[in-house]
């Protein structure tokens, strides 16, 4: 590749936008439109991999676009955590596009062009969040991500979609404008800088109750992290077509939330500053509470997508819990869990959408014996579920292992108890589904078979990735580890 | 020629008005008005450039020296305002001819353009002049033509709205005149610069306090500060769409300009903020305006009413920035004046397009419009997002600077309330979005087409400006900051 690092960063942002622009004109030609979607996503993947090799070589290219105000630029910078997040999104986008083609066609969804356009914009803003070089840039793309996913959530355009859209936009907008923006302006006022700095931009600039208030403004300002009690938007967003729930509400959007939290903890506050504050412990307890409560709620859901949504809420709080243990090892765990959960949860959603497409079933109580009709789907589902529980040989084991090690290191007894209890709860709400699918007899004779090929390929790919990440965790581990060591 | 720019700025539209009357053909009158307005825009652009490089321009009318003759003074603040007024006027005019064919009977078209030019000349005059009495004269020119313009509205309620505005506006103008008269009595001068020199000598007299109070109350009426805002919603709602777009973007800004001019330049900062508890008064009224008007906007079913109430709320933000009385606070106010003109200009021209196609702007008429008028509705959505203050729009820039200024001052409760206020905007904008994109059209078979190109061009110029100045803030911010610094006497 002859592109300079700066050009690569720009193309990671602009490629999806360019794709969206041309897709918009291809309403009459679905085949071309969807080929273009795939090509765009593969081009993005190549770009992100080129960036990855730069980061692994120890480079940190950055690019400043323009100054929105004096000393307040829109700026992009590559750093390990952002690179990890960008990689996850870029790897899963082509897979998800393939899945979308199968799903949207098989279910005869309307407005498919709008769907692909908004999807590409959402991916572009995800890249913007991942590569953001300061808080302002992060905030800008955070808001664009909310707005560009709104038409996707409300895709069906009926009364239910409209109401869910209200909850979605209401919670995400009000928290980001009410809390996050305030926190950012406050940080700017305190430090005169919004840059991400290892060790913390705010380190030494704020202490005591002010720090606690600021911390809560940040954590609750990032509604996308779905910490209770501002988690309601996530189950509401499940009215969207399944590919949206899969890539956006299991990966891009929610991970943008926890990613921002991790980034703010590591680069804005700094681990050492937070270790001296009681506020960090409070957030840890809230995250623990969210993990347990969301798991219990998940246990009671019969609708498969809703159960997965509550499982996501619980898993997101794992990341928050891990980072607020404030040990280097647990920070690694937080970063790894972003990756592990992404691959596992997208597989589960793919499976849920596959069941809906082939069997038109949405509830868990209808899944008896479905494993024999849809073997590929249910094998993938089982792998995803095992990863959620955190058993080897899946990616979920890896992050949980680091999380526990970090918790032991810091002697965070509460965190250890929460992790153990929630592992049991995870098993309690996933194992019955696997059991029903493989060992229970169906109540009536079924005639449906497996889903379209595109869907099967997509979900087997993500299931394999979940396994592969366990056996070859080198790259994400290296990225995560370099988060915790001082860079030159 | 270049030396005469300050007077040309006013005289071009002022002379164009009677000339326009001679052109009896509607289309011809439109082109002529457009030309005059574009010329004014060009002049204001040149003036801004000149001011930013060489500093304040002083122009003596007819060559008479200042205390005897009338003086025009263009500094950064005036330049910014002239740019907003003539710019918005020109862009809005592009859609005028198309719009009024549906809203105003053919025999009154020429009249409409004459009034429009007079109103434009009046506003430019208010801003350009450095003579207090001249301000009143131009205020009356712009107001009287405004009353007539509003009364041209198709709906019969326009007459009542115009009458309401006439009464309230006249009270306001009279108060201002009384204030100016009292100042003249105490100082013997009407020149703003002289006033600012001589007022401190007499500033402990009851007459000067009275003058100040009259001017402030009069201006608050004109700028529709809560609770003196009652004339505004109906006037905006029932006026012809083009008039609404023009006034919503400019009229209240001119009054805020006068407020800034009188308090900062004439009475002086120290007098203005000690004579009355102005700071407390304005921050409370500003916040009350934000909340009362935003709440009212949420419950409106006529969308012109909705955005009219939103304008009152936005005036509240400007007044809050003003009340901080720091350089950054005033910068935020001036910046928001510029930005709000872009938002409301875009929104009201787009509403004009809806009016043109549907003949009404009731909320239920927007049902299903997202599909029928995609470009117009997209513009309304972007304008609405700008109003909310989403990043990459001008609304975000305004909010950013206002909050920074408030935090610098340490007014934390106000910070929280301002942010809450912008969430109310989400609600009223989203009611419109939901109607346009989710509700099925009432009569699905009815063929409603996209707005004509002459509507789409001005709409999208303004929408693009909303985004452009939301990203590249150099022009707007520098001028606003320079103006604010010079008003505070801080050298940049």
Image (cartoon, helix red, strand yellow):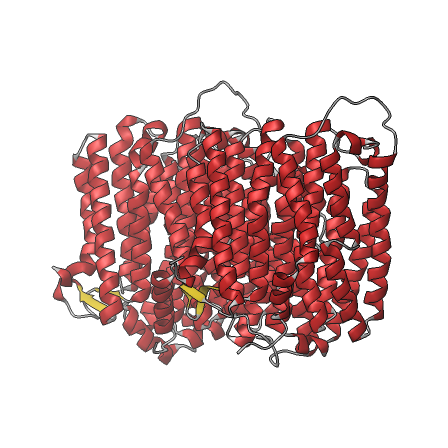
Q: Residue at x 60, y 32 (%)?
A: A102
- Depth check: A45 or A231 in front? A45
| Residue B205 in view here | no
Percent position (x, y) of residue A227? 72, 57
Q: Residue lying farthest top?
A: B445
Q: Where does the image place residue B236, in percent across and percent down from the top left?
A: 44, 42
- The relative height of residue A400 versus residue B100 in the rendered view (above or below) is below
B390 sits to left or right of B41: right
Q: Nearer the viewer, residue A309 or A228?
A: A309
Q: Split into 4 quadrants, where in the image is the C terminus of chain B?
A: bottom left
Q: Nearer the viewer, residue A80 or B203?
A: A80
> Residue A410 appears at what percent x and percent y?
78, 75
**Image quarter in which the N terminus of chain B is found:** bottom left
Q: Is A196 displayed left or right of A313 in the figure?
A: left
Residue at (35, 27) in percent of width and height: B102
- Residue B218 occupies quadrant: bottom left
Residue B114 location, quadrant: top left
Image location of residue B338, percent across then percent down: 38, 56
What count of labels does the image hold? 0
Camera sees residue B200: yes
What residue occupies the far front of the structure in this picture?
A471
Is residue A338 left or right of B428 when viewed as pictured?
right
Residue, x 35% and y 37% (percent of image)?
Answer: B456
Is A75 rendered above or below residue A161?
A: below
């Amino acid at each position: 590749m002859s592109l300079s690092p700066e050009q690569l960063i720009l193309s990671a942002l602009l490629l999806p936008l360019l794709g969206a622009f041309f897709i918009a004109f291809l309403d009459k030609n679905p085949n071309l439109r969807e080929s273009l979607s795939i090509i765009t996503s593969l081009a993005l993947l190549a770009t992100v991999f080129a960036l990855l090799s730069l980061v692994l070589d120890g480079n940190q290219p950055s690019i400043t676009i323009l100054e929105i105000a004096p000393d307040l630029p829109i700026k992009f910078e590559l750093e390990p955590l952002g690179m990890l997040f960008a990689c996850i999104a870029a790897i899963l986008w082509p897979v998800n596009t393939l899945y979308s083609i199968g799903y949207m066609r098989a279910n005869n969804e309307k407005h498919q062009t709008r769907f692909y356009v908004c999807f590409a914009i959402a991916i572009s803003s995800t890249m913007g969040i991942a590569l953001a070089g300061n808080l302002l840039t992060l905030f800008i793309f955070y808001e664009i991500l909310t707005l560009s996913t709104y038409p996707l959530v409300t895709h069906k355009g009926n009364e239910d979609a409209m109401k869910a859209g209200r909850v979605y936009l209401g919670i995400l907008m009000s928290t980001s404008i009410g809390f996050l923006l305030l926190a950012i302006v406050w940080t700017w006022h305190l430090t005169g800088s919004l840059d991400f700095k290892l060790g913390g931009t705010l380190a030494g600039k704020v202490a005591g109750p002010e720090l606690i208030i600021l911390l809560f403004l940040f954590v609750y300002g990032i509604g996308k992290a779905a910490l209770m009690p501002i988690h309601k938007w996530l189950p509401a967003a499940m009215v969207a077509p399944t590919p949206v729930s899969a890539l956006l509400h299991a990966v891009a959007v929610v991970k943008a939330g926890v990613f921002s939290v991790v980034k703010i903890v590591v680069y804005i506050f700094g681990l050492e500053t937070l270790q001296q504050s009681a506020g960090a412990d409070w957030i840890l307890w809230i995250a623990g509470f969210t993990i347990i409560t969301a798991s219990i709620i998940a246990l009671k859901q019969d609708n498969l997508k809703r159960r997965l949504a509550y499982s996501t809420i619980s898993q997101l709080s794992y990341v928050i819990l891990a980072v607020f243990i404030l040990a280097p090892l647990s920070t690694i765990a937080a970063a790894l869990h972003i990756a592990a959960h992404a691959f596992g949860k997208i597989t589960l959603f793919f499976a849920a959408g596959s069941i809906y497409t082939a069997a038109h079933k949405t509830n868990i109580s209808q899944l008896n014996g479905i494993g024999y009709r849809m073997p590929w789907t249910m094998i993938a589902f089982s792998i995803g579920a095992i990863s959620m529980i955190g058993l080897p040989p899946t990616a979920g084991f890896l992050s949980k292992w680091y999380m526990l090690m970090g918790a032991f290191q810091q002697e965070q007894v509460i965190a250890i108890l929460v992790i153990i209890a929630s592992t049991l709860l995870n098993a309690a709400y996933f194992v019955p589904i696997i059991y029903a699918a493989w060992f229970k007899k169906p109540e009536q004779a079924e005639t449906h078979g497996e889903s379209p090929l595109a869907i099967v390929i997509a979900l087997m790919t993500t299931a394999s990735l979940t396994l592969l990440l366990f056996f070859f965790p080198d790259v994400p581990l290296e990225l995560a580890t370099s988060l915790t060591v001082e860079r030159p | 020629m270049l030396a005469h720019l300050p007077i040309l700025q006013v005289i071009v539209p002022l002379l164009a008005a009677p000339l326009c009357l001679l052109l009896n053909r509607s289309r011809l009158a439109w082109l002529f008005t457009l030309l005059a307005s574009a010329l004014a825009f060009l002049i204001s652009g040149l003036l801004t450039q000149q001011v930013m490089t060489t500093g304040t321009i002083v122009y003596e009318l007819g060559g008479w020296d200042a205390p005897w003759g009338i003086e025009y003074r263009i500094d950064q603040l005036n330049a910014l305002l002239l740019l907003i007024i003539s710019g918005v006027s020109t862009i809005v005019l592009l859609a005028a001819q198309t719009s009024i064919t549906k809203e105003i009977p053919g025999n009154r078209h020429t009249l409409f353009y004459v009034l429009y030019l007079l109103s434009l000349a009046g506003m430019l005059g208010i801003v350009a002049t450095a003579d207090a009495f001249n301000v009143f004269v131009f205020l009356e020119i712009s107001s009287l033509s405004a009353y007539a313009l509003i009364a041209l509205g198709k709906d019969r309620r326009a007459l009542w709205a115009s009458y309401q505005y006439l009464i309230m506006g006249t009270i306001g103008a009279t108060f201002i005149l009384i204030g100016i008269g009292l100042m003249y009595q105490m100082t013997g001068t009407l020149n703003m610069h002289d006033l600012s020199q001589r007022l401190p000598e007499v500033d402990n007299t009851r007459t000067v306090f009275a003058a100040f109070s009259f001017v402030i109350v009069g201006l608050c009426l004109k700028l529709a500060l809560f609770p003196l805002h009652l004339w505004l919603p109906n006037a905006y709602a029932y006026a012809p769409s083009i008039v609404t777009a023009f006034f919503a973007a400019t009229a209240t800004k001119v009054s805020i300009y006068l407020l800034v001019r009188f308090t900062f330049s004439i009475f002086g900062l120290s007098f203005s903020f000690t004579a009355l508890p102005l700071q407390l008064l304005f921050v409370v009224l500003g916040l009350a305006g934000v909340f009362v008007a935003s709440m009212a906007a949420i419950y409106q079913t006529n969308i012109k009413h909705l955005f009219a109430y939103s304008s009152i709320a936005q005036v509240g933000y400007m007044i809050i920035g003003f009340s901080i009385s720091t350089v950054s606070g005033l910068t935020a106010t001036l910046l928001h004046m510029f930005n709000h003109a872009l938002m409301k200009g875009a929104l009201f021209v787009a509403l004009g397009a809806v009016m043109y196609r549907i003949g009404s702007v009731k909320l239920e008429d927007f049902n299903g419009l997202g599909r029928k008028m995609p470009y117009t509705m997209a513009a309304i959505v972007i304008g609405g997002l700008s109003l909310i203050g989403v990043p990459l729009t001008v609304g975000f820039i305004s909010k950013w600077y206002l909050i920074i200024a408030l935090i610098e001052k340490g007014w934390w409760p106000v910070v929280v309330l301002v942010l809450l206020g912008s969430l109310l905007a989400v609600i009223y904008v989203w009611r419109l979005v939901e109607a346009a994109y989710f509700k099925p059209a009432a009569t699905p078979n009815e063929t409603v087409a996209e707005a004509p190109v002459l509507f789409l061009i001005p709409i999208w110029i303004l929408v693009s400006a909303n985004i452009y100045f939301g990203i590249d803030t150099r022009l707007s911010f520098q001028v606003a900051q320079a103006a604010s610094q010079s008003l505070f006497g801080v050298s940049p």
